Amino acid sequence: MPDKGSMYYPRVQHYRELLDSLPMDAYTHGCILHPELTVDSMIPAYATTRIRSQIGNTESELKKLAEENPDLQEAYIAKQKRLKVSKPGCPQLTTTICTKRSTFCKVSLF
């Protein structure tokens, strides 16, 4: 980090703020779902495969759990609603997790 009086300090600070504002959850999931768009990914292939299948199975698992546990059905349905698709291939969690490659590219380029 350059000294505060340095001419580079405001520029470095600007980029730090930009990086801090990025939706890391979306980037992490996007990199897992689209490893072909990453360079030198540190995520092992077996982990990528497992995580991809878990993301894909979440909604069906919540439906099954809601049917099996009537007392918790409301909680499972609420969680399902948070997963509902707002755009084709791009479900909403806490942040956008893009399963569609073209959507991930748009998010990445903001």
Image: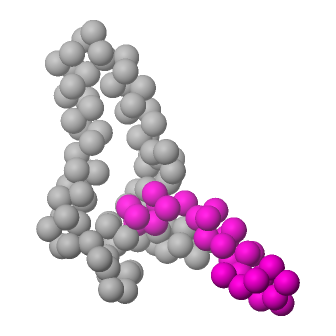
Relative vertical location of residue 107 with respect to residue 62 in this rendering, above or below: below
**Magenta-colored stretch includes residue 102:** no
The answer to whether any part of residue 88 appears in the image is no
**Magenta-colored stretch includes residue 28:** yes
Quarter of the figure with the N terminus: bottom right
Relative vertical location of residue 92 with respect to residue 39 in this rendering, above or below: above
Quarter of the figure with the C terminus: bottom right
Residue situated furthest bottom in the rendering = 7
Name the quadrant containing residue 3. bottom right
Residue situated furthest left in the rendering = 46
- Left or right: where does residue 9 sit relative to residue 49? right
Q: Position of residue 91 (x, y in %)?
A: 43, 49
Predominant SS along the magenta part = helix
Q: Position of residue 15 (x, y in %)?
A: 68, 77
At a point 21% along the width and 35% down the height, the residue shown is 61
Relative vertical location of residue 1 with respect to residue 104 in this rendering, above or below: below
Q: Position of residue 7 (x, y in %)?
A: 83, 90
At a point 21% along the width and 15% down the height, the residue shown is 69
Q: How many marks?
A: 0
Foreground pick, 104 / 94: 94
The answer to whether any part of residue 56 appears in the image is yes
Residue situated furthest top in the rendering = 71
Q: Position of residue 43 (x, y in %)?
A: 27, 72
Region in magenta: 1-30
